[in-house]
Image (cartoon, rainbow, N blue to C red):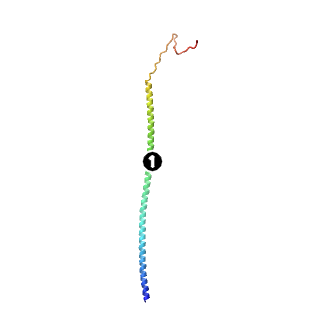
Amino acid sequence: MAISSLSSTQSVSSFGLQQIQQQQAQRNADQAEQAARSLRVAAQAAQSVANRAQENARAVRVESSQADSRSNQAQQGLVSMRSIAQMQSGFDSLKQQISSVLISESTIPVPVPVAPVINTSGQETGALISVTA
């Protein structure tokens, strides 16, 4: 009977070892599942952060595009203002020239026509030249 009792002791200890191994495997599986859950939560959080960052990037692109548009409009306005200022300067110069010409013409004495000299025949002298000789 010594053999059978040894055999049953080995079975009991083998059974106990098997239970410990199963419990260890179960703990390992539970820990792996918990780690997987944690990683899923972290992945979802990271995805949320990435989505917000992408939305922020889109918003910044829109703002950048609007700023570019405003900048272009401002530059066009500046070019227009410079062009208008140049035209105004040209008009002012032209106005000044016209004014100076009008003023100088108004100060030039208008020649008074001299009355023609009438000869004894009643003709104006100096108007006709006689070429008969």
Determine the residue positioned at 44% across, 42% down. Answer: 78
> Where on the picture, by quarter, is residue 44?
bottom left
Residue 121 sits above or below residue 36 on the image: above
Circle 1 is placed at which residue position? 69
At horizontal 42% and vertical 84% (from top left) the residue drawn is 9
> Can you give x and y, in whole percent of width and height, for residue 45 in the image?
41, 62
Q: Residue 75: percent from the left, percent from the top? A: 44, 44
In x, y percent, where is residue 28? 42, 72
Residue at 43% of width from left, 28% of height from top? Answer: 100
Counting other residues with Cα less than 10 Å from the Cα at mark 1, is it few (<14), some (14-19), or many (20 or more)? few
Q: Quadrant of the N terminus?
A: bottom left
Residue located 43% across and 49% down the image: 67
Q: Residue furthest top?
A: 120
- Secondary element at tag 1: helix
- Say how many tags the image has: 1
76 is higher (above) or lower (below) than 3 = above
Amino acid at circle 1: Ser
State the residue lying farthest toward the bottom: 1
Q: Is residue 18 above or below residue 31?
A: below
* Quadrant in which the C terminus appears: top right
Of residue 114 and residue 55, the one placed in the foreground of this image is: 114
Residue 29 pos. (x, y %): 43, 72
